[in-house]
Amino acid sequence: MKLVLLIIGLVLLAVGAVGALVGLATASSAQAEYDFLCPSGPAPPQLCAALLSTVATYQAVAVGMGIVAIVGWASRSRRRS
C-alpha cells in the first residue's frame, strides 16, 4: 500500500510540474504576442481580448498544476519518513 501511495505521489509531482511549466510557457507566449500586436494597434480588439484571456487562463492553469505538484511532493515526502 505504501508503494502505491509513493507512486501516486511521484505521478502527481511529475504531472503537476510539467503542467505548470506548460501553463507558464503558454501564458508567456500569449503575453509576448499581445505585447507585440496590441499596443501598436494592428490587431483587432477581439484578438487582443482573446490574448489577454488566454494569458489569464494559462496563468491560472500554471498555479493549479503547481498546487498538484506540491501535493505530490508532500505526499512523496511524507511516505518516505
Image (spheres, helix red, strand yellow):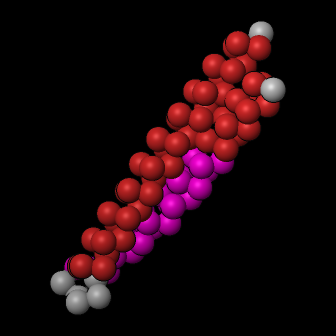
Q: Viewed as shown, does residue 39 lie left or right of 27?
A: left
Image quadrant holding the C terminus, namely: top right
Judge whether 53 appears above or below 69 on screen: below
Q: Which portion, as a residue range, is magenta?
A: 43-68
Among all residues in the image, which is located at the extreme top? 1
Residue 35 is situated, as x and y percent measured from the top left of the image, at 30, 79
**Residue at position x 75%, y 25% in the image:** 80
**Residue at position x 38%, y 56% in the image:** 25
Q: Is residue 10 visible?
A: yes
Q: Is residue 46 visible?
A: no
Among all residues in the image, which is located at the extreme front? 81
**Residue at position x 79%, y 31% in the image:** 78
Q: Is residue 36 magenta?
A: no
Residue 30 is situated, as x and y percent measured from the top left of the image, at 34, 65
**Viewer-proximal residue among 50 and 40:** 40
Judge whether 16 appears above or below 45 on screen: above
Magenta: predominant secondary structure element?
Answer: helix
Image quadrant holding the N terminus, namely: top right
Residue 64 is situated, as x and y percent measured from the top left of the image, at 61, 50
**Residue at position x 29%, y 88% in the image:** 39
**Viewer-proximal residue among 51 and 1:** 1
Judge whether 42 appears above or below 10 on screen: below
Q: Viewed as shown, does residue 24 lie left or right of 35?
A: right
Judge whether 47 appears above or below 19 on screen: below
Residue 56 is situated, as x and y percent measured from the top left of the image, at 50, 66
Q: Viewed as shown, does residue 18 lie left or right of 51?
A: right
